[in-house]
Amino acid sequence: MHNDYLFFETSKKENHDKLKININKDKHICFNSKSKEIGFREIKRIRNFLNKVFSNNIYSKFPIDVNLGHIVFEDKLSIVLLETICYYFIREYNCSLRVTYCCSSNILTEGIKYSPLQMLCVSNKQNNDEYKKKSSWDIKGEHFRRLLRASDNENKMLTSNIMQDIDSFLKYFSIMKDHRDSISEVVAELIDNALEHTNSDCLIDLDVTHDYIKGNDKTIQTDETYRGINIVIINFSQRLIGEQLKQKISKNKELPHRYKLIINAYKNHSKYWNDNYCEDDFFIVSSFQHKISGRDDPSVTGGTGLTKLLKNIEEKSEAYNCYVLSGSRVFYFDHNFINYDIDNWIGFNQQNDYINYPPDSECLYNSDLFFPGTAYNLNFVIKREG
């Protein structure tokens, strides 16, 4: 992917002294995970370890074994990030890389069954080309994966074509039409934002799970089945969410009225700056407001309906886990806080007041992993039609 090197340049600035490189009796370099859950923290350790190996010409010639043991992935994004790390080192060094694991999955992480990581369970360089192909394109069974290039954005029909492809894919699994419409619109909008605003490639990975019956609750009819729809959309970029909007407001004095209200909100929010909420967080929250855009033209107003679409899907879902990772911050989309006021502002807080109050503390978190660009993790558990 274009700009994916940024993810690894970040690692080079960190202290790797605690990461020891061991060579076993078979002359393989080994990384042995001690974590039972693979999330951002362990993804970071794996990336930093491989960076340290390949920064030394002596070590880079040895086969590498990444042994995860008996694990569960925290979510779909963790799976895709590990795939991306392996892809990068295979592409750059054509290395012999083996990744072994015994993985338990659930309705949110069943996508591991379709992961190209399965091709790395044996140490064989001959699998490298196939791994790279499957990492970029895999539309088969319950799995939809495409790598869209920045140059693809020249196709004016790209967004509508993607929407149609996703809709057709979901229809095959008896997903209700209103869910299909909302999900395909969300995916298309995020892809359009990535390709146009950051001028970088965009990877979409979507899987649909097999049927699940809800727990053992006797009040639930046993003929009601549910399926997980799990989506990851990532792009690597030096631009983080909110940065363009911040620059736009600071550089332009002549702005439409709606942007002037953001300046007013900024003054009110600045009273709440602390270790858990800062200026950059304010501009993340502001980027998801109605008719707000970070584009350079001061007269341009956005029209993102992302939050409204997510609220619509989440409210109809049995369960969900939706967030975006950008830089070192995670912003959660909780439909309980996605409510428009009379002027179409979203407070992301109990007061439903964007202008005067900061977002709820449950919406923003620090990430153990710095991600250059944007990475969306969208999990929905939806009742199956018919």
Image (spheres, helix red, strand yellow):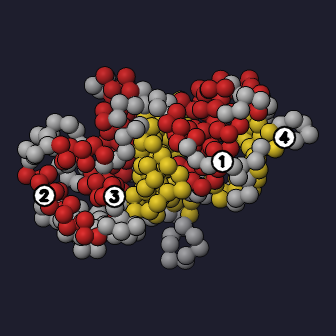
Q: Earlier in the sequence, mark 1 or mark 4?
A: 1
Q: Label 2: which residue?
A: 261
Q: Label 3's element?
A: helix
- Is label 1 in a helix, a strand or a loop? loop
Apparent side of residue 378 relative to residue 259 in the rendered image (left or right): right
Within 10 Å of disc 1 (Cα), the crowding (few <14, some 14-19, many 20+) is some
Query: Could you give the CA–CA distance between mark 3 and mark 4, rounded to whole angstroms?
Result: 43 Å
- Circles 2 and 3 in contact, beta carbons < 8 Å: no
For label 4, the SS is strand
Q: Is residue 116 left or right of residue 243?
A: right
Q: Position of residue 292 (x, y in %)?
A: 20, 48
Mark closest to the chain's N terminus, 3 or 4:
4
Query: Which numbered disc flags the more N-terminal residue, 3 or 1?
Result: 1
Above or below 159: residue 170? below
Q: Residues within 10 Å of mark 4 (few under 14, many from 20)?
A: some
Query: Residue at image x 11%, y 40%?
Result: 299
328 vs 374: above or below: below
In the foreground, 57 or 99? 57
The CA distance from mark 4 to mark 2 is 60 Å
Q: Residue 25's spot in the image, x, y percent?
A: 92, 40
Q: CA distance from mark 3 to mark 1?
A: 29 Å
What residue is disc 3 on?
A: 281
Q: Are marks 3 and 1 in contact (CB under 8 Å)?
A: no
Q: Alpha-carbon neighbours of circle 3 within 10 Å: few (<14), some, or many (≥20)?
A: many
> 71 or 301: which is nearer to us?
301
